Amino acid sequence: MMLPKNRFKKALQEGRQQIGLWNTIPGSLTAEMLATCGFDWMVIDTEHSLTDVPDVLPMLQAVAPYRTAPVVRPANNDKVLIKRLLDFGAQTLLIPYVQNAFEARAAVEAIRYAPRGVRGVAGMMRASVFQTVQDYHRRAEEELCLILQIETIEAVDRIGEIARVEGVDALFIGPADLAASMGHVGNLDHPDVVATVERAIHAIVDAGLPAGILVTDLEFARRCIEWGTTFTAVGIDMTLLAQAARGLSARFRD
């Protein structure tokens, strides 16, 4: 059995724009439905949702037959959480709230086996297709994709040093926390926040890495793409559900 290919990582390396969606509603049925909606990638979020580590495995299994690539966000930059998600077969991880090169190196080490890292070794796991992938433990990192989140003004100022850490595949801007760190919590439209997002995107691209972002304002999303993002999330499942339900309700109230 060959090592499963990471289509999303290949697309980032080739600079092809990837449009994504956030999956915060737990459960394999919702994940599978979202995977049929035509997005290039989808974040299975365990940081700001009810989804927990054991929920991720059936969600990955549900998404597997479809072209949408799953990206899993652990609750934090923790080697135990990362190890478990990788063993389940996650190939792309989005690590939240990375502030500096030291934390970036910790994330890189968490996805790699010794002597290059600290990932614990297991045998019978989904990641190795249950021990049928030849040389899985020596080759696993070839198809792993590590994305780090830039979520504060301090991290924006350190994009250069974070991007230079070997093993980091891409950087992702979290605009909500970035705005909060700048004293504009809840105000993503503030001119200073918008300017900082633009500066961060340019800094990531100039450092030679793909830049990503989550933006639900579609006009702003298009501006981010113009500035240089190559993986751009444009919606959140819970938000889309609420908007559609409220809109339907309002039509009949009127």
Image: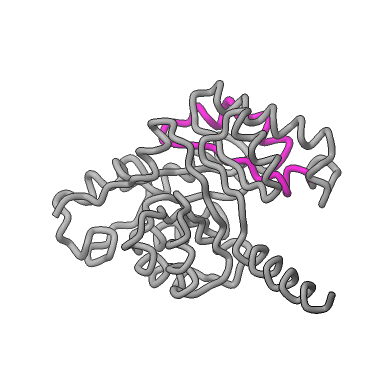
Q: Which residues are magenta?
A: 152-179
Question: As rendered, which of 244 and 87 lies closer to the eye?
Answer: 244
Q: Residue at x 31, y 48 (%)?
A: 113
Quick check: 149 above or below 53?
A: above
Question: As rendered, which of 127 and 14 lies closer to the eye?
Answer: 14
Q: Is residue 254 left or right of residue 81?
A: right
In which quadrant is the N terminus drawn? bottom left
Q: Residue at x 50, y 61 (%)?
A: 44
In which quadrant is the C terminus drawn? bottom right
Q: Is residue 129 magenta?
A: no
Q: Residue at x 58, y 29 (%)?
A: 228
- Give the x, y percent position of residue 157: 69, 29
Question: Which residue is most to the top?
Answer: 206
Question: As rendered, which of 143 and 230 lies closer to the eye?
Answer: 230
Question: As rendered, which of 154 and 150 lies closer to the eye?
Answer: 150
Q: Residue at x 85, y 45 (%)?
A: 184
